[in-house]
Amino acid sequence: MDPPQTSHLSPRKKRPRQTGALMASSPQDIKFQDLVVFILEKKMGTTRRTFLMELARRKGFRVENELSDSVTHIVAENNSGSDVLEWLQVQKIQVSSQPELLDVSWLIECIGAGKPVEMTGKHQLVVRRDYSDSTSPGPPKTLPTAVQKISQYACQRRTTLNNCNQIFTDAFDILAENCEFRENEDSCVTFMRAASVLKSLPFTIISMKDTEGIPCLGSKVKCIIEEIIEDGESSEVKAVLNDERYQSFKLFTSVFGVGLKTSEKWFRMGFRTLSKVRSDESLKFTRMQRAGFLYYEDLVSCVTRAEAEAVSVLVKEAVRAFLPDAFVTMTGGFRRGKKMGHDVDFLITSPGSTEDEEQQLLQKVMNLWEKKGLLLYYDLVESTFEKLRLPSRKVDALDHFQKCFLIFKLPLQRVDSHQSSWQEGKTWKAIRVDLVMCPYERRAFALLGWTGSRQFERDLRRYATHERKMILDNHALYDKTKRIFLKAESEEEIFAHLGLDYIEPWERNA
């Protein structure tokens, strides 16, 4: 570290010089007068810091060599907000203003754009530790960034597709899936909640102190996080990925129509490959499983948004041929903003239809598609919905609306060729599609439930039960205290009944 020099912040304070060779931006070169940047050298290194400072100055940014009261943005790399405040404390630096604490990615985006870009959650270095404790040693902490309260419920967190902690969430998703295969529900829920809360964080976990104050991270979960931080991987996850049972269940359940019981049966019979399963004449397959094997290559490939949109057009055309006033909404991951998925879900409702027209619609659509050669397989499940029935107390309960699970034959010409990844020579692709028909007055509840994500819905129902003494499912919301069903015309009204801030669909990727 260079010898300390007297700071112009205060004649009594001394702190280390970050660099002495660089010249500050000259006034005539500065395009953005209201923005003053200081780049922290800690964990970045002198060479990279110097390079970024010069690059930013060439783009018209004012970059200070040293920290001062004029600085509006402190930029750091591989540091949390807590790390930055600790550095300021150790160096005995006081700043009367409250500059933004940002990841270096923000500055790099600014340099690329040639102008300041919007600061989002992924850029901000969040301080999770309380620096206002007057009993702690050292000078007053004059950057009191608010401690962010993170809820244990996914329905009180905004989770976009910008995942800053994918190395951790991928690990916990694998562990949760393995527990699901072994029907270990408690451990599965533990890992799912851990992955969910980490996906919602606007900062990257780079040290164990970053996990302080974050809910849903028990001792076992923290041990796995610590191992990944130190070694770059988890030995437990590695063992699961190499486990023959996990590999077999992962393979078997990838077949449409194959669940845990069938996977267990095949595994116990000694099967480890799908080719062996298919060639064994002693096995009897359901219609769904036969279709799953027949169109396997298409069904295990991802569905693109362009393909989903093409299916949406065809679904709307077919539905409105019989119910012109019907509303057809794409739900699931695509409604949450995903670009890829494994199937496409649609919710259908009609304000002017009779009960008979609703019950007959899906069969009419199937008949139409069969005539057009667009239907490869379908399973129509009739409605068991009862209006006076209480909502289900089961968190993962399937709803009782009429629904159809099908495999759709999507013609290539209906898809934007530039956005499709089909093999050369193919003229169609098998796509998994789910259609759900619900009564118009239940549309808000059904839309909320079928939008997901799975963990978001689990926590939304758990919150309703434990915090509001209500029961919520895809059909209704019941207030146990008042003993009444609460009506809702929209998702926003359901959130309002629960006393929750509205979460947009694209913020429900828990």
Image: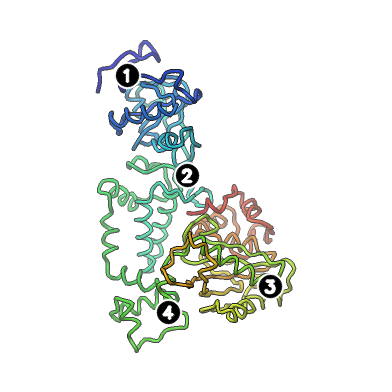
> Does dot 3 land on a helix, a strand or a loop?
loop
The one of 490 and 486 positioned closer to us in this rendering: 490
Measure the alpha-carbon separation of dots 3 and 1: 75 Å
Which residue is situated farthest in the bottom direction here? 282
Of the numbered discs 2 and 3, the one sitting upstream in the chain is: 2
Q: Amino acid at mark 3?
A: Ala
Measure the alpha-carbon separation of dots 1 and 2: 35 Å
Measure the alpha-carbon separation of dots 4 and 3: 30 Å
Residue picked out by circle 1: 15
Q: What's the residue at 52%, 74% (across, down)?
A: 409
Of the numbered discs 2 and 4, the one sitting upstream in the chain is: 2
The one of 418 and 326 positioned closer to us in this rendering: 418
Q: Disc 1 vs disc 2: Cβ atoms closer than 8 Å?
A: no
Position of residue 6 measured from the top left corner of the image (x, y, whole percent): 33, 13
Residue 30 vertical placement versus 106 (above, below): above
The one of 452 and 414 positioned closer to us in this rendering: 414
